Amino acid sequence: MHTMLLSLKPEIFDLIRTGKKIFEYRHQFYSEPINAYLYISKPVQKIVGYIEFDKRINLKDWKEEYKCNSEVSYRIDDYLSRNYKYAMPINKFKMTTEITLKDLRNDLKKFIIPESYYYLDNFDELDNYIKNNIKFTGELIENNFEIIDEADICRKKY
């Protein structure tokens, strides 16, 4: 399975960490299940979490599936209008020990902060560094998607 380094804003990370956010929405994303280390942007600037994503869901497929539910359909339209195309189910989340931006820049020849994400398959030095310096901590959060609560689809508020 592929692994990426995914950049998140601190407020989005907090929603995932607390189990409130169970889907991540993006314009483009890998089509198959994928793992991601989480780089949290300013002011945090650290790698501090790990996610296992399931296969992406095309929002247009949800639009068709929920066409009889005007409230859900409206929320999906809102996300589509903001250029989101896919929902990635967050199967598992785990906190990790921290790797700071300072450490990344000091210990690696070249570290580039991901604008959105990049695949670690293309960055062996970084991939090995993360694997050697990260330890899982805290509780594992697991989400079950056998039945999706309509309130969780393209949520406006958490």
Image (cartoon, rainbow, N blue to C red):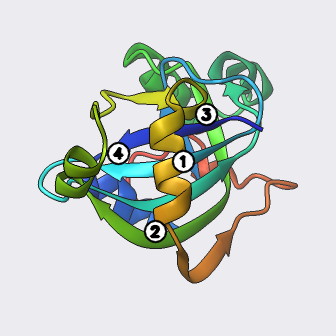
Tell me how far mark 1 sits from mark 4, CA to CA.
21 Å
Tell me how far mark 1 sits from mark 2, CA to CA.
24 Å
Circle nearer the N terminus (3, 1): 3
Tell me how far mark 3 sits from mark 1, CA to CA.
29 Å
Q: Badge 4 is on which residue?
A: 8
Q: Residues within 10 Å of mark 3 (few under 14, many from 20)?
A: many
Circle nearer the N terminus (4, 2): 4
The secondary structure type at the circle numbered 3 is strand
Circle nearer the N terminus (4, 3): 4
Instruction: Report the mark closest to the observer, 2 or 3.
Output: 2
Quadrant (top left, top right, bottom left, bottom right) of the C terminus:
bottom left
> Can you see residue 18?
no
Callout 2, which amino acid? Arg
In the image: residue 127, left or right of residue 32: left
> Are the two marked residues, 2 and 3, in contact with CB atoms closer than 8 angstroms?
no
Q: Badge 3 is on which residue?
A: 87
Which residue is situated farthest in the right direction here? 146
Circle nearer the N terminus (1, 4): 4
